[in-house]
Amino acid sequence: MKNIVLLISFFLTVSLGFGQKASASKARKLFENRAYSEAASMYQSLPKTKENLQNLGDSYFFNAQMSKASNAYGQLFATNDSLAKDYYFRYGQALKASGDFKTADSILSIYTGEVMDTPKLKRTLSAIVPYVYELKPLKNSTSGDFGIGWHGDNVVFSAYRNNENPTYEWNNKPYLDLYEASLSEEKDALENIEPFSEDINTKTHESNATFSSDGKTMYFSRTNDKRVKIGDDKIATIKLYKAELVDGKWTNVQVLPFCSDTYSTQHPFLNPSNTKLFFSSDMPGSLGSFDIYSVDITADGFGTPVNLGEVINTAHREQFPFMDQSETLYFASDGHQGLGNLDIFMSNGYAGFYSKPINLGETINSGMDDFGYVLNEDVQKGFISSNRSGEDLIYAFLRIPNKKRYIVEGVVIDKNTKELLPGTTVTLYDDKGELVGQTIVGEDAKYAFSTKPNQLYKIMGHRDLYALGEQEFTTNDDGRFEFNIELEIESYDDAEDIIVTKNDGYMYIELENIYFDFGKWDIKPQAASILDIMVGLLKKYPLMEVQLGAHTDSRSSEEYNLNLSNNRAQSTLEYLVANGIERSRLRSKGYGESQPLVDCKDDCTEEEHSINRRCEFLILK
């Protein structure tokens, strides 16, 4: 009898082992196929091994079930010492979403190598954000709605509302379609909700539509209906499409030429002038998971996509771009320091340059994903999407100026003429010399930066052909919240006697003429003493760039004189480089006998030949 019991126990143990191995294999396959909802259900009942806990936590994390993700990652961290850095990031974000900022900051401090303090960040943001927000759920928006955008007086958004669509394995929800609705008078409720054109909606995902000002062109995201193997995974990438409204029908639906089966392009937004399309992509050259790009819209189609760079993009997600009339860029990111997961940020833009992003603060951001910011500036009302309630939902907001904001603002003027100086680059640094913000002022020459209380700052202005101007100030002066600084900068020719503006309108550095031996180009002591003045000037103005132009008289052949002048210009450049001037700031050009000051051809006196033999130092910027 005892042997029978032992035999039964053995077969039960073996069967259970085989069953667990089969279940683990099936769960892993579901996870690798990104069927995260079903994978999580299976991993819940499997042994808590390192791999199982990693995949369980990730399955919850990628479906924004942050409380469950936090619990799974907590078990993972409690039982394993060596973990990939990505798990520190995800665990920290899951903890923030659950409200455990103390543990989250501890975990994320290890991940970033910097001290994280989310409560302090909240306090700081309350003093620097330009606006506060009154936020409430948009009436008649249901779970799964997100990515709202303007279509004339109406709005278009993405939703899971069509239950006849196939089910998406990632979250066991129907595939997304686009829907159109009108708004209530207060812009706080959706009305007359209808599916968007069946010429656009298909059996796969459509989302995030943006429309031209005349309403006749739209861009939107659509997921490939087939998966492509990328590395070890089969992935259905997302592409951007364009459609045109012809006789009331959306037609000419075409994928944009820079899209690919091997990477995703999504979240399109047309700038107010309809000349650029902003979007998010993980295309080659991206800094991280998803970066924000822009592409010029031309008469012939599209230019080459341009990454907005490290000021905007990070090693993580930057998505859902929106641009207002003043070229302020709004976007969602979980790579910049925030309150948890995707937060909404703003960055002032001018001529393709963007200032350091500012988190919009806790009146609009939460510990969960907050994204898809759009604004009607005429009424200061707009919408965001957020899964703070557990599912994606659209929220309406009213934007109100922040009365507690610390700010420095002003204009840039010429120190002597007092004229406005549009196009000046204004840069703000903190007391550690770290960049706080940078902008290029427009036609009104005005700038504005958010600042922090009780802080020393340096503000600097630079414009081509002007000396660098700077001022320092502190935000604890007399308890003031706002500082108005008239930033004065001085042109080079006003600042230095040896810099003159000639009749051709260009600025030159006027030095005593440099002499070379006949047919030679080596720097003699007389020339060196003059060039040392040039070295001192270039070190005094570290942003100045100069072209060194060498001219000869008309004796000898034109070819000989051109080669001789090129050699003399290059020799002059090399002397400056050898004395500490960066080569990138210098250009050399030989003109030969082509630009004489005295046009006496070959019938010149010795004095006239001497005048024509010269080096000129043209200031480029």
Image: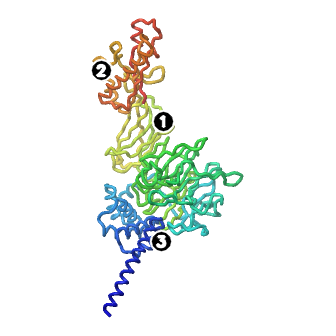
The CA span between labels 3 and 1 is 58 Å
The residue labelled by disc 2 is 528
Which marked residue is nearer to the observer: mark 3 or mark 1? 3
* Residue 389 appears in the rendering: no
The residue labelled by disc 3 is 38
Look at the numbered disc 1 and give the secondary structure of its residue.
loop
Task: Find residue 95 and report its horizontal and vertical position in percent.
Answer: 38, 65
Which marked residue is nearer to the observer: mark 2 or mark 3? 3
Task: Find residue 335 and report its horizontal and vertical position in percent.
Answer: 41, 55
Look at the numbered disc 2 and give the secondary structure of its residue.
helix
Q: Amino acid at mark 1?
A: Pro
The residue labelled by disc 1 is 422
Q: Residue at x 44, y 53 (%)?
A: 129
Instruction: Report which quarter residue 513 is drawn in.
Output: top left
Are the residues at dot 1 and dot 2 in contact (C-beta closer than 8 Å)? no
First in sequence, mark 3 or 1: give its number: 3
Q: Which mark is residue 73?
A: none
Vertical placement of residue 299 versus 415, above or below: below
Q: How many marks?
A: 3
Quadrant the C terminus occupies: top left
